[in-house]
Amino acid sequence: MVFFPHLCVNLQIGLCGDRQAAPAQTHGAPDMGRKSSFSNRRSDCIHQIDSESKASGAAPLLLLFCALLVGSVFLLGCRDQKTTDEAGGREAPEVAVSVVPIHPAPLRDILNLPGETEPHLDVRVASDAAGRVEALLFREGDAVAEGELLARIDVAARKAALDRAKAAYQLAESVYDRRRKLFDRRIITQEELDYSIAEQTRAEADLDQARVEYQDGFVHAPISGRVNHLHVDQGEFINRGDPLLDLVNIEQIEIIASVPESDVRYLRVGQTVKVRIDALPGKEFLGRIDFIAFKADPATKTFRAKILMDNPTLEIRPGMIARLDFLRRVIPDALSVPLFAVVDRSGERLVFVVEDGVAHARSTEIGVIEGDRVQIVRGLEPGDQLIVKGQRNVEEGTRVRIQ
């Protein structure tokens, strides 16, 4: 058997040369130039072996040997190339995050309810007498003191009736005095004296009624406040019971809220309430619970609560929308996180914590919410490093860099 060692050595050197040149190539698409060079070298070697083998007569055996050698070297070169590519690959970059440690702290359980402002005192003043409105002494918006005269209704006619009643009473009283003297002298009978007594009593009653009717013609303010609306004009004729004007006192404001049945047990009369008015942004007021209904509304199953608050500047007007914060309880050792730190993934509330430079997802159960913080009932432990910035850019097992 004849060998051609110089040809095999040349072939191996050519293949190894191509293989050693591979790392210098850029990773990515295959190096077509290198493959072409390798194919050319292999063809030249095989052509040379073929020529020499024909001269020596050992062509079949030599061709088989060279084919096996070429295949082995080619596979070895591919394996080395794959190893080089893997060694040159980069790891996934670290995600920059910010973290805060979790510590127990008191958390307030706040019940927030809407309400509507109402005047503490709101009176519709009606007429106690029928007749013509002789005078209206105030205009809308004017301040009124309690007991101050507001209007006069047909006072002249009532004054005349009062004068008649006084005259009739004086006459009856005079007749009674004379008949009493006559009875003492036994000139008249007891029956005539009794008649005089009855006439005097009736005249006195008529006088009292005339005085009441006369006073009913003068309408006085039942409360201090402001004239909010006039229902009549001067000179109009009104009947007994018709409204004259509306008086409101807004130095104190009432706010009415409907408390759910599950929360009414946390509230008590005298409790302080924080109040915000939609029409007065940026301002907060304090009120107190004045009344809590003992019976629920049958339609809504809520309990009516009345909150009183001072309004010295009169800037809060009746009818404004209010937001009420009731303190239900204080949780002394709550674990809470910012609301934005909780990530919703397919309906599951997750937070991410960092352990040994790796992000880990924690499924949570939330509890009380106060402002921009939420209580985590399950899923966190004291001392955990909570991701508060970059939490939406990480997954379970993501390597992170704390900044």
Image (cartoon, rainbow, N blue to C red):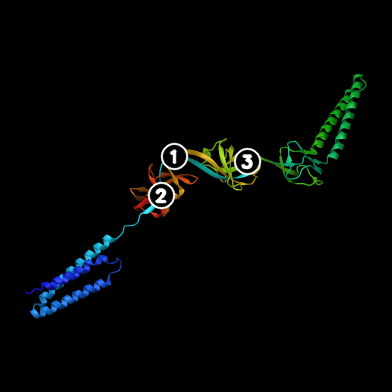
* Mark 2 crowdedness (10 Å alpha carbons): few <14, some 14-19, many ≥20: some
Residue 221, given in percent of the width and then of the height, sits at 74, 38
Determine which quarter of the picture holds residue 216. top right
C-alpha gap between disc 1 and disc 2: 21 Å
How many marks overall?
3
Identity of the residue furthest to the left in this view: 1
Residue 167, given in percent of the width and then of the height, sits at 89, 32
Q: Amino acid at mark 1?
A: Ala
Q: Which mark is residue 105?
A: 1
Residue 222, given in percent of the width and then of the height, sits at 73, 37
Q: Which mark is residue 254?
A: 3
Residue drawn at (84%, 32%) of the image: 207
Contact? badges 3 and 1 (CB < 8 Å): no
Which of pointers 1 and 2 lies earlier in the amino acid sequence? 2
User: Is residue 254 at all visible to an observer of this figure?
Assistant: yes
Which of pointers 3 and 1 lies earlier in the amino acid sequence? 1
Which of pointers 2 and 3 lies earlier in the amino acid sequence? 2
User: Is residue 68 at all visible to an observer of this figure?
Assistant: no
Residue 211, relative to residue 352: is it above or below?
above
C-alpha gap between disc 3 and disc 1: 35 Å
Residue 3, relative to residue 209: is it above or below?
below
Question: Depth-wise, is mark 3 or mark 1 nearer the camera?
Answer: 1
* Mark 1 crowdedness (10 Å alpha carbons): few <14, some 14-19, many ≥20: few
Location of mark 2 (residue): 98
Residue 45, relative to residue 254: is it above or below?
below
Q: Secondary structure at mark 3?
A: strand
